[in-house]
Image (cartoon, coloured by chain):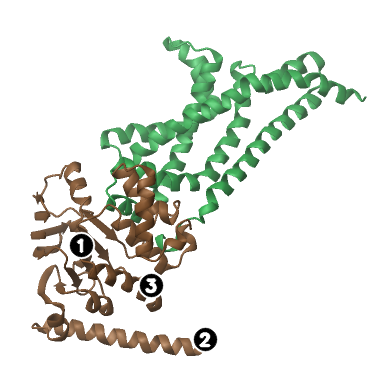
Chain colours: A brown, B green
Amino acid sequence: MIGLTNIEKRFGDNLVLKGVTVSLDEGSVTALVGPSGGGKSTLLRCINLLEIPTSGSLRIGDETLAFHPGVKVPAKDIQRIRLQTGMVFQNFQLFPHRTAIENVMEGLVTVLKWPEPRARERALALLEKVGMVHKADAWPATLSGGQQQRVAIARALAPSPRVLLCDEPTSALDPELAQEVVDVLGQLAREGTTMVMATHDLRLASKIAQEVVFLDAGSIVEKGPASVVFDNPERERTKRFIASLRQEEAQKESGGEGSGAISS
Amino acid sequence: MPHWLQLMLESLPTLLWAALIFTVPLTLLSFALGLIAGLVTALIRLFGPKPLVAPVRFYVWIFRGTPLLVQLFLIFYGLPSVGILLDAFPAALIGFTLNIGAYSSEIIRAVIGSVPKGQWEASYSIGMTWSQAMRRTILPQAGRVAVPPLSNTFISLVKDTSLAAAITVPEMFQAAQRIVATTYEPLILYVEAAALYLALSSVLSALQARLEVRLNRYGGFLEANA
């Protein structure tokens, strides 16, 4: 189980998260949605401590960590939490100087000190799972965005994290390439991978997430089962946001067809 | 055989010998030590504690801002006045090392900064510590970008070692000067010395090109990382 209690995050004078409390069940998939600047990315990054919360506490499995303003968190504690999490970035962030399989092996060999043959075996299994085993020895620069993201998912899963954090995993991709990433994430969800994803992508969120947390201006406006929040939101603020996302999506689709017609 | 060619051939072994036992070792040693100095200096400037940053910036300022020849004179002729007596070769080695350290620290600082922040985050996200991220992710990528500017520094250094002649190091240029003193043929000998420096730096340029090909095999930074 993952629990965030009263998480506050301050950048200078700017209070980005205003006491957020959420708990996520093992095996559940949660979508963090909300307008840009609403704090969803920051909240996600507070889970693996790429951002250190100003105050509050974080629990992942048996590890608990409390934060206090002005108190530095020991590197060891940060490390402990990070080993329980994996992260997928908007821009993939594969290591460009390592091949696909070396990217996946990196955490196992460097951090967990696995012997190389064992790491290679696990990396191959993961690449198989994301449908990238045929590109195991390819350099990231030669892969499409969707392929890079699938390798990045395999890399994040390699150390068997308790939770997979996805920060806008499809936002940098064309709809077609986004689809292959959505498919892989959907398959992981069905297999019971615990996931939290910050996303603008309604298709991704509604296909995969059971739970939705709507964040605006650093606070949770509404949370609940995906079907309720997406189709029948309680709050006016949520309704407006979901409606605007739907409109955006519809525009994008018709816009995409239009430009396609011109170029063909 | 024309006189000039005969003189060149006769003096060639002397010049090559001087290059082999002074110019080349001085270049390689001071470049290697200078790179270490530059890396440490760059890391302090980027990540070090505040009290260390100021002295390090002072060092870079001094050694980039004063002529190399003056630095060598200060070390070899100046320091004995305060009781520090150095032989010519160590004095030259120290001078070149400190000078290379100052220049390369600026290059290393820039190339480390050029690696996208997301690469740090990706490294941290799979559980790496700062030093693991530095060693495994950042430095290999920074190193690739650093090859052309550091090669520049290296090639300048080969030629600059001729300045050591002025503080009595019997390297290749001084060997040429000595032959000139007995043969009174400055044009022939200095053309020969220039040609040998050119040959040395051409070898380095070729090595640089090969290294770049090797380091470029992965196709560079990913567009999405920019």
Dividing the image into 4 quarters, which one contains the N terminus of chain A?
bottom left
Residue drawn at x 25%, y 79% is A202
Name the subunit of mark 2: A
Say whether residue A261 is left or right of residue A51. Answer: right
Name the subunit of mark 1: A
Q: Quadrant of residue A36?
A: bottom left
Q: CA distance from mark 1 to mark 2?
A: 39 Å
Asked whether the beta carbons under mark 2 and mark 3 sit within 8 Å of each other, the answer is no
Q: Which residue is mark 3?
A: A173
Q: Position of residue A31 (x, y in %)?
A: 19, 71
Q: Position of residue A175 (x, y in %)?
A: 37, 78
Residue drawn at x 15%, y 70% is A217
For mark 2, give the secondary structure. helix
Q: Which residue is mark 2?
A: A263
Q: Quadrant of residue B156?
A: top right
For mark 3, give the secondary structure. loop
Residue type, numbered disc 2? Ser
Name the subunit of mark 3: A
User: What mark, if any, has residue A44 been given in the picture?
Assistant: 1
Q: Nearer the viewer, mark 2 or mark 3?
A: 3
User: What mark, if any, has residue A152 been given in the picture?
Assistant: none
Q: Taking A48 as reference, is B160 above or below it? A: above
Residue type, numbered disc 3? Leu
Residue drawn at x 23%, y 74% is A208
Q: CA distance from mark 3 to mark 1?
A: 20 Å
Q: CA distance from mark 2 to mark 3?
A: 19 Å
Mark 3 vs 1, N-terminal side? 1
Residue drawn at x 63%, y 25% is B162
